[in-house]
Image (cartoon, rainbow, N blue to C red):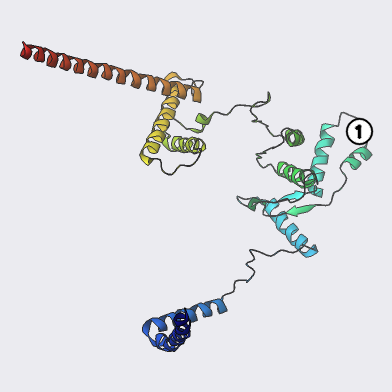
Amino acid sequence: MSNYSQNQPANSSLQIERLPNLMKSQSGLMLLACLCVIALLKLFSQTNNKSKVATSYWGGSKEKSKATRKAKTQMAKPTRNSVALYIGTPHDVQSNIENQWYQYNSQFAIRSSQLTSFFSANPTLYVPDAQRGIAVIGAAGSGKTFSVIDPLIRSSFDQGFPMLLYDFKFPAQTKRAVAYAIKRGYTVKIFAPGFPESETCNPLDLLRDEEDAIAAGQITQVISRNFDRGGNSSSDKFFEEAGDSLVEGILLVTKAIATLTGEDKYCDLMMAQAILSLLTSCTWKYECQNHDYVQGELAVEYQVKEDTQLYVEK
């Protein structure tokens, strides 16, 4: 132990003395150059040390006026991927709705004061570029849906946009939106399995005809991915692609029934399941016939060998 403690300082000093020689070598110079490059990149890089994704601030009158101008431009000339919504009915939209109510209620004696109070002016908050997405943040029960989401939905109805409403607490929000949509001339369809007002959805209606293999392949992939429980990557891709091809072919055969019979009522998933069951039954019967044939051949061969053995013994 004493010899080790005496030799340790000597070894440390020897390594320090060898450090200048190491830095003068080719590998040392390469290491020093890499350190210099890293230091320069760190110095001239404009990334924030706090790694902020974005910054934000409270919008004032300047931001509101800019958003109002852009939203009115988008609403005047609506194009694809350029949508503006609003919270609070603007005066022009309010006047149009008021005229419609006057025409509809012309046969009833309604006082103008009642309509004026009903269509009282509301401050309007414009939301331009709504196609990018809107996030409403607040605590549970703070009124996010009533104060922001519902007015945005009504503004889309006022502009005639198609609407797909996902009501997580059905039918709480649907009851408010459906009445306004029907008043604006919309055709409302509800898809809520388990409720009597729900309609049905036939995935085979997405196929144009029995030759639309692209749509059939997309439907097959969606069904296959939704039935994938654990995403097991160790499964054989050959069998996965073979199963997708089988389902795709069955969907196309089911769609061809409408062309053969002239009726679309048979083109549904139940018919596809019946075709798959029929195909499985035919395959099973074919395998059973082959199995019986092979068993018979083995029995004959065994009997011949047994007779030959008896003949040799005799």
Left or right of 233 in this view: 80 = right
Q: Amino acid at mark 1?
A: Ile
Residue 134: image location, x then y, percent: 69, 51
Disc 1 element: loop
Q: Residue at coordinates 38% horizontally, 81% vertically from top-left?
A: 27
Does 51 sit above or below residue 163?
A: below
Does 99 sit above or below residue 288?
A: below
Location of residue 299 by image quarter: top left
Regarding residue 24, the answer to whether it shows in the image is yes
Residue 272: image location, x then y, percent: 46, 24
Which quadrant is home to the C terminus? top left
Q: Residue furthest front?
A: 2
Q: Residue furthest top?
A: 314
| Crowd tier of the residue under label 1, counting other residues whose Cα lies within 10 Å: few below 14, some 14–19, many 20 or above | few
Which residue occupies the foreground of this view, 92 or 40?
Answer: 40
Residue 6: image location, x then y, percent: 47, 84
Count the marks: 1
Q: Mark 1 sits on what residue?
A: 110
Does 99 sit above or below residue 268?
A: below
Left or right of 182 in this view: 257 = left
Residue 170: image location, x then y, percent: 71, 33
Q: Residue at coordinates 45% horizontally, 80% vertically from top-left?
A: 4
Left or right of 216 in this view: 68 = right
Q: Residue at coordinates 41% horizontally, 43% vertically from top-left?
A: 234
Location of residue 66 by image quarter: bottom right
Regarding residue 268, the answer to whether it shows in the image is no
Left or right of 107 in this view: 188 = left
Which residue occupies the foreground of this view, 47 or 230?
Answer: 230
